[in-house]
Image (spheres, rainbow, N blue to C red):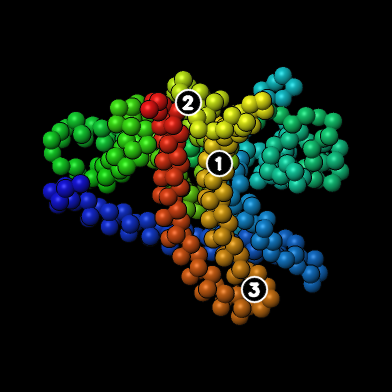
Amino acid sequence: MSKHFYKKSGFLKNFLLLSGIVIFLVFQALASNLQQHETTLQEQSATHETGTHKEKFNAGEMIIEHIVDNHEWHILNLGNFHLTIPLPVILWYDGKLHTFMSSKFHSGRDQYEGFGISKEKENKGKIVRVNQKKYHAEGVIERDKAQEMPLDFSITKTVLAIFMSLALMTWLFISIANTYNKREGKSPKGIQSVLEPIILFIRDDIAKPSIGAKKYEKYMPFLLTLFFFIFLNNLIGLIPFFPGGANVTGNIAVTMVLALFTFVITTFSANKQYWVHIVNAPGVPWWLKFPVPLMPIVELIGVFTKPFVLMVRLFANITAGHIIVLGFISLIFIFGEMYAGLGYVMSILSIAFAIFMNLLELLVAFIQAYVFTLLSALYFGMATEEHH
């Protein structure tokens, strides 16, 4: 980028403004987390109190509930009032289609049309066929062992978050494209000046060096979509209140689909030289290839382990960051149960560490999007490299 670009486009001003907004959202997120967890603790104490005994705060259960997918979108608690957005439930069972809103389950407490939210450890949170006798006798939703689980095509919290992020990306980039057409030959302006350096960075520092100057252009739409989808959802996932808070990139099903796209594009883009290198790698001693094809087997396994590593890396890093932040918040209530004063002292330390981790996750959000995009581009480059 030239000095003329930075002066004319107001890049620095827009960047500082965006950074200020993100930091403000981080502090708001922490405040929301504290209020929500305090309300949860009070509800658990009131609900499970039996005589003088109170059930202890379960940090693991609270953390898992916050990072897994859900059939409704919780927004806030005000005393006994719980504001949630019910989502469509779409099930296929026994040759019939069942559709209704998740509000019929009343936050998992009730069953509807023979289905309910499972409380079993192995299927917790999933919609299952309810054992009617067991439910009516004890009020516990348990899967009927004699019945199969329904095929679930429901619009969950993660699915809705994906739709919203895709709508935001579509609007954003169509607007930028129209701005380029209207302001052709002029310096970037507004959000265009913020995103243009990132787009050029992906083109000049990722696509061109990894794929080659002659072939990179046809992969640019996928690489740009991949980067901004991951980066945007990483940022939105740091905000626990609506429309944020959905752990999209921390869902292994989502990262699996992204890695699968990379695998399919790599496989169908691969030239003859790529497959020859796998079957008969040059420079490898013959006894590693014949009579036992040791190296070809290793190379073929590598074809499948590369997308697997992509899937696990993104999922593990994003999920770990959320768990650490929620773990710091949980310490407040764990120590508070021992002695009230310890809870106040620990709240200062926990908030300080949580703020640090949230700021660190802003960096991780960019790094993970960059790494996933870079490795995808490297795989495309390896598959299309010409023999020298």
Amino acid on which disc 2 is placed: Tyr
Amino acid on which disc 3 is placed: Phe
Q: Residue at x 59, y 70 (%)?
A: 332
Residue 123 appears at what percent x and percent y?
A: 73, 41
Residue holding disc 2: 274
Looking at the image, which is closer to me, 188 or 97?
188
Quadrant of the image containing the C terminus: top left
Residue mark closest to the camera, 1 vs 3: 1
Which mark is first along the chain, 2 or 1? 2
Residue 335 tag number: 3
Which mark is first along the chain, 3 or 1? 1
Which mark is first along the chain, 3 or 2? 2
**From mark 2 to mark 3, how far is it between C-alphas?**
58 Å
Q: In this view, does 278 lie to the left or right of 20?
A: right
Q: Could you tell me which secondary element the residue under label 1 belongs to?
A: helix
CB atoms of marks 1 and 3 within 8 Å? no
Q: Can residue 230 be seen in this view?
A: no
* Dot 2 crowding, Cα within 10 Å, few <14, some 14–19, many 20+: some
Q: In this view, does 15 lie to the left or right of 57?
A: left
Residue holding disc 1: 309
Which residue is farthest front? 286
**From mark 1 to mark 2, how far is it between C-alphas?**
20 Å
